[in-house]
């Protein structure tokens, strides 16, 4: 019969014990804050790596929620496999020749079901991963439609001149054409302005004056349909400092280049000209593009313009607060991909 050792957050060890011996201790509350387990008393792993022991220390309601999350993750993965083979208009439930507005409505209807922000922080990593994958597919498909239809959308109709109802103007004696009263301001402008010759089209008796067209508005950039565009995030209204960073894959160095403050030590180093005092607490928003992801976390300044900064750049070292499991998993994968990109031959 297998024996196990368990260790709490303070390093205290109990074991070897069988599961039958551990169960009453866990149910009776005599063991708490257990963080790791071992099969030999030497090699320790997180409690989650030994599910039969973990199950003893987790309330049944949480275990049921985890099981439900894993089942939902499997359902989403199957749905992702199914829709990958479908045309975009079928996925969004719109006609193939629908206009851009209709496609957007279809995207919102489908996409809001799978946006990662709808999940609680305690969601199972499998569910977070599956949700992020299917939303990435939807946002990529919509961005392609946006680019295609935005360039072919018909321009707004130009204003046309219509005939006004006839207005009877009295004809002055000795003239053959009516005299239309001119406002004083217009008359002054007419007398003071230099004469402008306007060409008379053949076969007409009056010049044709071109009607000026309104300047075309500069086209707006196409949305990317990333999560941070799909959901509006409210900012805090207290006096605490907020820092927002867009993090392309080429900026992976903020997590790995500094010897003291890096992801493995629970932080990152941000090149920054402004000085932020040590100990300052702030709200940090990290926005990623490929795949689209956003992390909002509390942070504390633990390094300020240090001489050990990478590349001689001034900046601040931040220690991150508690990250959700999905966010930490995303960061670890982001760093892995960033290292691989750096190592790839150019």
Image (cartoon, rainbow, N blue to C red):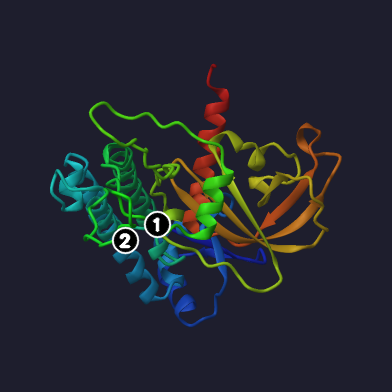
Q: Mark 1 points at which residue?
A: 230
Q: Name the residue nearer the viewer: 79 or 58.
A: 79
Q: Name the residue nearer the viewer: 93 or 43.
A: 93
Q: Name the residue nearer the viewer: 222 or 157.
A: 157
* SS of the residue under disc 2: loop
Tell me if I can see residue 44 in this picture. Answer: no
Which of pointers 2 and 1 lies earlier in the amino acid sequence? 2
**Residue 4, percent across and down?**
49, 60
Report which quarter residue 118 is drawn in.
Answer: bottom left
Measured in 3D between alpha carbons, the distance from the residue under mark 2 to the one under mark 1, in whole angstroms, is 8 Å
Name the mark nearer the viewer: 2 or 1: 1
**Residue 96, percent across and down?**
14, 44
Task: Specify few, some or many for label 1: CA neighbours under 10 Å numbering under 14, 14-19, or 20 or more.
Answer: some
**Residue 78, percent across and down?**
21, 49
Report which quarter residue 219 is drawn in.
Answer: top left
Q: Name the residue under label 2.
A: 112
Residue that extends furthest to the right in the rendered view of this protein: 307
Q: Which residue is drawn at the image coordinates 49% and 42% (left, top)? A: 333
Quarter of the image for the N terminus: give it: bottom left
* SS of the residue under disc 1: helix
Quarter of the image for the C terminus: give it: top right
Residue 74 placement, left or right of 93 = right
């Amino acid at each position: 019969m297998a024996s196990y050792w368990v260790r709490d957050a303070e390093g205290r060890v109990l074991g070897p014990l069988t599961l039958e011996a551990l169960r009453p201790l866990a149910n009776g509350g005599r063991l708490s804050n257990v963080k790791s387990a071992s099969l030999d008393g030497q090699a320790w792993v997180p409690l989650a790596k030994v599910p039969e022991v973990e199950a003893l220390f987790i309330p049944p309601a949480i275990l049921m929620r985890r099981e439900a999350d894993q089942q939902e993750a499997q359902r989403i993965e199957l749905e992702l496999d199914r829709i990958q083979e479908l045309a975009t208009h079928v996925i969004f439930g719109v006609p193939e020749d629908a206009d851009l507005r209709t496609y957007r409505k279809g995207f919102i209807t489908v996409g809001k079901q799978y946006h990662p922000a709808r999940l609680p922080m305690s969601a199972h990593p499998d569910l977070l991963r599956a949700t992020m994958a299917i939303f990435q597919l939807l946002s990529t498909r919509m961005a392609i439609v946006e680019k295609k239809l935005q360039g072919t959308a018909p321009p707004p109709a130009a204003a046309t001149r219509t005939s006004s109802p006839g207005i009877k103007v009295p004809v002055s004696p000795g003239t053959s054409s009516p005299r239309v009263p001119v406002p004083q301001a217009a008359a002054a402008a007419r007398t003071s302005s230099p004469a402008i010759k306007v060409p008379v089209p053949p076969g007409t008796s009056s010049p044709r004056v071109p009607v000026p067209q309104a300047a075309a508005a500069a086209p707006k950039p196409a949305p990317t349909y990333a999560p941070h565009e799909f959901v509006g995030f409210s900012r805090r209204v207290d006096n605490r400092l907020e820092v927002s960073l867009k993090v392309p894959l080429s900026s992976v160095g903020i997590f790995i280049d500094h010897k003291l403050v890096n992801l493995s030590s629970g932080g990152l180093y941000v090149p920054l000209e402004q000085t932020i005092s040590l100990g300052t607490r702030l709200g940090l928003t990290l926005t990623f593009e490929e795949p689209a992801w956003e992390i909002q976390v509390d942070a504390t300044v633990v390094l300020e313009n240090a001489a050990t900064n990478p590349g001689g750049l001034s900046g601040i070292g931040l220690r991150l607060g508690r990250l959700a499991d999905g966010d930490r998993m995303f960061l670890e994968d982001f760093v892995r991909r960033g290292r691989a990109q750096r190592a790839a031959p150019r």
